[in-house]
Image: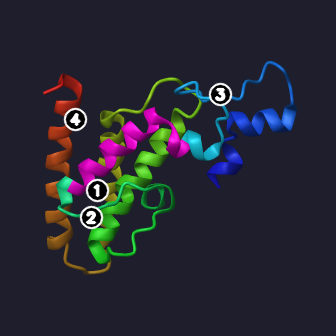
């Protein structure tokens, strides 16, 4: 779906074939910026994804490989249950935040990401209530994640 809404410089040049449309990455100025480059190969984007992976992995004490499948396709075959739910929402929030700066030279920051995540994590916890499911396990996971997220934001903003 993202590919239909967000056209890469490479795709724009192929469609319109106009001289003023450059086939360069908006973030790193690399040549031949196709869709995969814009979402994964660009070194500036990889810095963003690296922060996301590291924060999720350390906060939840799990191993997420630094490959595009979990981040772009939500493919995490080793995770199940509440943990999978808590991991997928921050990854989806990261994709949404990145899509919001699609053509910008600026990169999304952890503060933007955390704002989006805290909204979705609250919705996860609330979704357990109508089904009479115990929120104890999910509350512990969310609390641990938010605590580490807040610490990472401070470190990211102040370089500590």
Per the image, label 4 sits on a secondary structure element best described as helix
Say whether disc 4 or disc 2 marks the residue closer to the N-terminus: 2
Which residue is under mark 1? 122
Q: Nearer the viewer, mark 4 or mark 2?
A: 4
Residue at 86%, 24% in the rendered image:
18
Q: In the rendered image, which residue does mark 4 sit on?
A: 153
Label 1 – label 4 distance at C-alpha: 19 Å
Cα distance, mark 1 to mark 3? 39 Å
Whichever of labels 1 and 4 marks the residue nearer the N terminus, that label is 1
Q: Are the residues tagged 4 and 3 within 8 Å (C-beta)?
A: no
Q: Is residue 122 left or right of residue 3?
A: left
Q: With respect to residue 1, does 13 lie above or below?
A: above
Q: Which residue is mark 3?
A: 24
Crowd class of label 1 (few under 14; some 14 to 19; many from 20; radius 10 Å): few
SS assignment at label 2: helix
Dominant secondary structure of the residues highlighted in magenta in the image: helix
Which disc, if any, is residue 125? 2
Residue for point 59% across, 47% down: 36
């Amino acid at each position: 779906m993202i590919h239909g809404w967000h056209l890469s410089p490479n795709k724009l040049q192929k469609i319109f074939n106009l001289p003023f449309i450059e086939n360069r990455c908006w973030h790193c100025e690399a040549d031949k910026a196709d869709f995969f480059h814009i979402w994964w190969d660009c070194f500036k984007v990889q810095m963003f994804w690296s922060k996301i992976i590291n924060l999720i992995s350390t906060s939840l004490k799990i191993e997420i490989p630094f490959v595009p499948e979990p981040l772009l396709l939500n493919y995490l075959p080793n995770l199940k249950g509440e943990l999978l739910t808590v991991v997928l929402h921050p990854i989806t929030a990261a994709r949404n935040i990145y899509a919001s700066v699609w053509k910008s030279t600026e990169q999304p920051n952890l503060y933007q990401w955390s704002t989006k995540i805290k909204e979705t994590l609250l919705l996860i916890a609330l979704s357990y209530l109508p089904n009479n499911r115990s929120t104890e396990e999910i509350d512990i996971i969310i609390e641990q994640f938010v605590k580490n997220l807040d610490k990472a934001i401070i470190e990211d903003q102040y370089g500590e």
